[in-house]
Image (cartoon, rainbow, N blue to C red):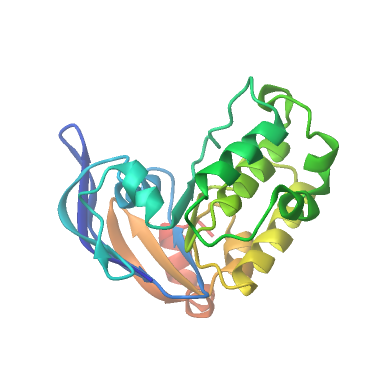
Amino acid sequence: MLEVEDLHAYYGDSHVVQGVSLTVGSRECVALLGRNGAGKSTTLKAIVGLVPSRKGKVVFGDRRIERLPTYRVARTGIAYVPEDRGIFPSVTVDEHLGIAVKASRGRRSRKTADYVYGLFPRLAERRSSLGGQLSGGEQQMLAIGRALLCGPDLLILDEPSEGLAPVIVDHLADVLELIRDEGTPILLVEQNYQLALRLAQRAYVLSQGCVQFAGTMSALDSDEAMRRTYLSI
């Protein structure tokens, strides 16, 4: 589904992503883990074109996408939920979802706003509320729901549990498990190790922009030295 090979990306002169390689297969969730500043979010941004890559290859399906602008990457079937969620403060929940439905035209999504409201009943209660009036958890629900309405072939999530109460994180985990089990592959950056352990079959661990571990989540969970060194667990 997604193949990243020897990816390099910079912020100015700072070499943040240094030869990252990873894959995401169909119907699987893959976690990208590491301490703050390891290069995880920059790797995601380089994949979707928000940060230009200077070297390396990104293949989605059978297409090279590393030189495409972000809007064209989105049209290939990748939905990206950024760390800041990207919610418009003066647009209602209903309007957010309506925009996503329009954006999905030409793709094979059969999901509707009612599908999102079924996943997140709290959003149904706030459907007339402006984005700026939502709590952090509600904004995250909306960001994920909006992405799903675009009919993605791959869902990329950057720190979906950050700053959220445990009860909200548990609900998000239930929803993401459902999405994964319905067949949508997920690439997940997450500081919450227990959430990653619950959702992901495989993991990559980054440190200083380089991959230090690639393998199954069960193998990582059994490697105490790796977790202590690179995840502080």
Up the image or down, 24 lies above or below 75; here it is below
User: In the orientation shown, which residue stands out farthest toward the front?
Assistant: 106
Up the image or down, 218 lies above or below 3; here it is below
Q: What residue is rendered at 32% in x and 52% in y? A: 47
- How many marks can you see? 0
Percent x, y of residue 95: 66, 32
Residue 161 appearing in the image? no
Give the quadrant of residue 7.
Answer: bottom left
User: In the orientation shown, which residue stands out farthest toward the top?
Assistant: 90
Give the quadrant of residue 173.
Answer: bottom right
Q: Name the side, left or right, on which 48 lies relative to 54.
A: right
Q: What residue is rendered at 21% in x and 40% in y? A: 10
Q: Name the side, left or right, on which 82 lies relative to 207.
A: right
Percent x, y of residue 118: 79, 54
Residue 233 appearing in the image? yes
Percent x, y of residue 68: 24, 48
Percent x, y of residue 165: 74, 43
Give the quadrant of residue 171.
Answer: bottom right
Camera-side residue of 178 and 101: 101
